[in-house]
Amino acid sequence: MTPKKDIEELLAHWKGRLRGSLLDLAVLYMAAFHQGELYPYSIKKNLEEKWGDLVPPLPTIYSTIDRLKANNYLESKVNVEGSRLKKILAIKEDGWVALENMMEEMKRFLGVFEYHETEMEFPRRRSKNE
């Protein structure tokens, strides 16, 4: 039997990687389809509505945006409001290509669960004799 600590470490690592990948997808998706101007703070607020306490902190969102900009998926334009500078995010052509590919991959990965789609519950655990 695997020690509980090993399972917890594996799960924590997996959750971090999964959340990071989903954050990339979510940021690109919002940049593509958000109505109005999109800012890093508005991304956080939108994610809080959907993900609740699973939302990463604002610095993580900023670093995700910076990485997506470095890969030429996003661009930011500066909007001056009084004494504040706000970065308005927009998706670029390479971002559209990345988003389409990521969405297609997501569909493929989630396809493995389609046989439980109507039940919407966890499958029962098989015994070793089955």
Image: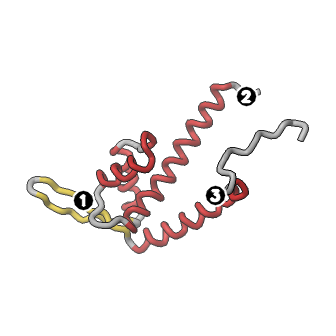
**Residue occupying the far left of the picture:** 82
Q: Residues within 10 Å of mark 2 (few under 14, many from 20)?
A: few
Residue pictured at 73% horizontal, 57% vertical: 115
* Amino acid at dot 1: Lys
In x, y percent, where is residue 53? 43, 39
In x, y percent, where is residue 31? 37, 64
Residue pictured at 14% horizontal, 53% vertical: 84
Find numbered disc 2 in the image and state the secondary structure of the residue it sits on: loop
Between 45 and 58, the one lying in front of the other is: 45
On screen, residue 102 versus residue 90, left or right, reads: right
Report the Cα–Cα distance between label 1 and label 2: 47 Å
Find numbered disc 3 in the image and state the secondary structure of the residue it sits on: helix
In x, y percent, where is residue 5? 63, 26
Figure check: 75 above or below 126: below
Figure check: 73 above or below 3: below
Q: Indicate which disc residue 2 carries.
A: 2
Residue pictured at 51% horizontal, 53% vertical: 21
Residue under numbered circle 3: 110
* Amino acid at dot 3: Leu
In x, y percent, where is residue 26? 44, 57
* Amino acid at dot 2: Thr
Label whose residue precedes the other's in the sequence (1 or 3): 1
Quarter residue 87 falls in = bottom left
Q: Indicate which disc residue 87 carries.
A: 1
On screen, residue 130 versus residue 116, left or right, reads: right
